[in-house]
């Protein structure tokens, strides 16, 4: 009952001073709106980086040969011959934390179809590769394990290759293309994947059985890398450890010695990018928090003036029986109402600003629930904190002197 | 025995002004029965304001006893005094002290806002009744700036009535009003007194004092005269003798 009355009194005081209350709120409004917009931008960029990395397969693990010196000369990774099919078979049969494993060899050259040609890359893989990369065939189908075993000259092509070779809109499935003069039968077209985080066009690719690429194009029996997927993103670190143990054993790597292979998981990449994103978010929030603090000081300022201005009113209220706490609460509630109303308007403004940033600047954004809750809580606390001092001052006035105040 | 509305004995109040101690009230004793209409008179500095603050529980005496409605108030703290003011005293001030931009009805409701025992409906009912008593039922939703001085003071009187106090304390209640309006206000006070209200009226105008039943005169913090008025004037009758203005 008493609380409700006080709420009414405070509400009335604000309504009677609409413009002043609004101006007071402005600091909080801008503060909250910027906190929410900044967090949304930070969170949005973090998520878009994460999504891009995930589209490459967030539980992907890559095993590559480690560059070694041979007679003082450092060799490039692709020339290393330390990764073999034996390694692939070992990992495929022994590693328990992996779902899919694919060997990988690659080369580049000219793809030709009819009178069109296009420079592209050929990746020699097995059918599991698509599952690892979270990729689907859009038209036709992936080549089969049997075709891998028999080193058949079949291939699936990426969207970029299709666009540049089949310029008249023919159906690529079933047609014959040539890669470095080796004919391949196209069995499928991959769905579009776009650029990766580093701006590389992932659709500019031809996938063929690794056996075929090894024999017909590269003429090697080594692997450039082995790609695998862990059971889950969380377990990829353990999977890396498991593979490392297996490989160390089979490659007879002494403890402490440099291994002739290197294992990387996407998890590491994600955490690197995330920490950069988090730092950025933190910086943005710090700036926004300062404006919220200034908003709070604005409230204190106005409340202080308001108490001075209403000294006679406070005196009268005390004379007709208001207790110290009644006056304290009245001004505290007023401060909280101002800050919370300002906070609500700020939330609305922040969310709509975020919306327009996304629409007009096409920046990735994501308004998180916690950012709204936090900035709202901060508002209420700001109100209490900065409203306390003026309210305390009002409550401790002497009624006789307050009523005489001019 | 019936409780006295107000009972003060050897009441002293002194203030420290730097090195000196000023005895604003220097041993005052009197009692006011329920239903009395008493004027407290005195020139400025006589201690009448100090006495009014003490009776109004806005201040605490340095020594002596004070009972209102039988309740001793000497050792009460700030909040307990506030409650006594809320339940037992109705204040009327020289400058009305109404809340600006607030309707007459809401102004009258104000003391009841601080009384937990009274709900919304009861509050509204009592405020309407109080405004009825001061004949302002047609001005419920007017704000002070839309009312004349006399009407504002009547709102203030309604506010002092709304908590059904033991005593109504009026501090120079007619000080800001012209003679005719003053007489109207005094007439209203006499009416309320007739209905059984105890009224303590502080003034320095002997003319106004002659409307009350008893006059207490203070000088230098002491009572120099305390007597029943032999010839109480009736404000309503005197109003007729004032020529109509304009």
Image: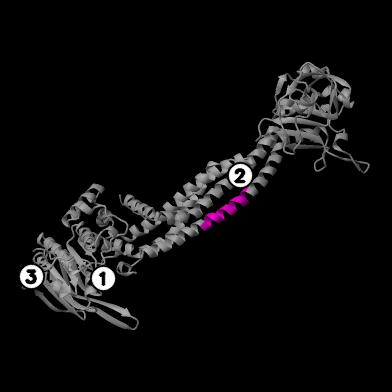
For mark 1, what is the residue?
A: B60
Q: Secondary structure at mark 1?
A: loop
Q: Magenta span covers which residues?
A: A281-294
**Subunit of mark 1?**
B
Task: Assign a secondary structure to mark 3.
Answer: loop
Q: Label 2 vs label 3: CA separation?
A: 82 Å
- Residue bearing mark 3: B232
Q: Residue furthest right?
A: A71
| Chain letter behind tag 3 | B
Dominant secondary structure, magenta: helix
Could you tell me if the residues under marks 2 and 3 are in contact, i.e. CB atoms within 8 Å?
Answer: no
For the point 50% across and 56% down, the residue is A295
Residue A188 position in % (x across, y down): 75, 20
- Which mark, by number, is residue A33? none
Mark toward the viewer: 3 or 1: 3
Compared to residue B65, the image places residue B86 above or below, namely above
Residue at the extreme left: B230
Q: Where, quadrant-wise, is the C terminus of chain A in this rendering?
A: bottom left
Q: Give whichever of B32, A118 is nearer the camera.
A: A118
User: Residue at position x 33%, y 67% from top?
Assistant: A402
Residue on which disc 2 sits: A41
Extreme front residue here? B246
The image shows residue A164 at horizontal and vertical percentages of 79, 26
Q: Taking A250 as reference, is B38 left or right?
A: left
For label 2, the SS is helix
Q: Could you tell whether A266 is left or right of A315 in the image?
A: right
Earlier sequence position, callout 3 versus callout 1: 1
Q: CA distance from mark 3 to mark 1?
A: 33 Å
Q: Chain of mark 2?
A: A
Mark 2 or 3: in front is 3
């Amino acid at each position: 009952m008493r609380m409700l009355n006080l709420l009414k009194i405070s509400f009335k005081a604000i309504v009677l001073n609409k413009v002043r209350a609004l101006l007071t709120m402005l600091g909080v409004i801008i503060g909250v709106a910027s906190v929410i917009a900044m967090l949304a931008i930070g969170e949005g960029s973090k998520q878009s980086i994460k999504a891009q990395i995930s589209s490459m397969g967030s539980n992907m693990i890559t095993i590559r040969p480690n560059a070694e010196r041979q007679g003082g000369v450092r060799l490039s990774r692709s020339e290393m011959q330390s990764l073999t099919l034996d390694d692939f078979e070992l990992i495929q049969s022994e590693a328990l934390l992996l779902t899919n494993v694919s060997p990988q060899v690659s080369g580049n050259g000219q793809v030709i179809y009819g009178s069109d040609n296009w420079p592209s890359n050929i990746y020699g893989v097995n059918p599991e590769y698509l599952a690892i990369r979270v990729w689907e065939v859009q038209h036709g189908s992936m080549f089969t394990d049997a075709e891998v075993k028999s080193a058949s000259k079949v291939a699936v092509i990426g969207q970029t290759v299709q666009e540049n070779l089949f310029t008249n809109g023919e159906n690529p499935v079933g047609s014959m293309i040539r890669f470095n003069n080796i004919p391949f039968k196209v069995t499928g077209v991959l769905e579009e994947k776009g650029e990766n985080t580093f701006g590389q066009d992932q659709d500019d690719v031809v996938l063929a059985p690794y056996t075929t690429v090894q024999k017909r194009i590269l003429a090697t029996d080594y692997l450039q890398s082995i790609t695998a997927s862990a059971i889950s993103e969380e377990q990829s670190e353990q999977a890396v450890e498991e593979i490392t143990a297996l490989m160390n054993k089979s490659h007879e790597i002494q403890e402490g010695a440099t291994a002739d292979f290197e294992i990387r998981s996407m998890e590491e990449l994600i955490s690197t990018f995330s920490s950069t994103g988090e730092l950025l978010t933190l910086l943005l929030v710090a700036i926004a928090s300062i404006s919220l603090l200034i908003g709070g000081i604005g409230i204190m300022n106005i409340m202080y003036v308001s108490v001075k201005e209403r000294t006679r009113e406070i005196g009268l209220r005390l004379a007709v029986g208001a207790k110290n706490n009644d006056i304290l609460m009245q001004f505290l509630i007023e401060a909280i109402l101002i800050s919370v109303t300002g906070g609500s308007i700020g939330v609305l403004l922040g969310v709509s600003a975020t919306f327009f940033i996304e629409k007009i600047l096409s920046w990735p954004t994501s308004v998180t629930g916690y950012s709204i809750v936090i900035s709202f809580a901060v508002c209420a606390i700001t109100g209490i904190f900065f409203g306390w001092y003026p309210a305390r001052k009002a409550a401790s006035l002497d009624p006789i002197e307050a009523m005489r105040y001019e | 025995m019936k409780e006295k509305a107000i009972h003060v004995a050897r009441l002293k109040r002194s203030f420290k002004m730097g090195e000196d101690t000023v005895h604003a009230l220097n041993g005052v004793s009197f009692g006011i029965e329920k239903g009395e209409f008493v004027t407290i008179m005195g020139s400025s500095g006589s201690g009448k304001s100090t006495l009014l603050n003490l009776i109004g529980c806005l201040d605490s005496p340095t020594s002596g006893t004070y009972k209102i409605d039988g309740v001793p108030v000497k050792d009460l703290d700030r909040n307990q005094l506030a409650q006594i003011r809320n339940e037992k005293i109705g204040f009327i001030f020289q400058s009305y002290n109404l809340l600006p931009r607030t309707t007459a009805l809401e102004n009258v409701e104000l003391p009841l806002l601080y009384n937990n025992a009274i709900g919304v409906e009861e509050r509204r009912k009592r405020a309407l009744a109080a405004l009825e008593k001061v004949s302002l039922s047609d001005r419920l939703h007017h704000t002070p700036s839309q009312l004349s001085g006399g009407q504002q003071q009547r709102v203030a009187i309604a506010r002092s009535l709304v908590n059904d106090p033991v005593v109504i304390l009026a501090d120079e209640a007619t000080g800001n009003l012209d003679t005719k309006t003053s007489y109207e206000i005094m007439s209203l006070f006499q009416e309320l007194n007739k209905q059984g209200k105890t009224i303590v009226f502080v003034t320095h105008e002997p003319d106004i004092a002659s409307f009350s039943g008893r006059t207490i005169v203070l000088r230098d913090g002491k009572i120099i005269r305390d007597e029943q008025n032999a010839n109480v004037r009736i404000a309503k009758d005197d109003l007729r003798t004032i020529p109509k203005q304009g």
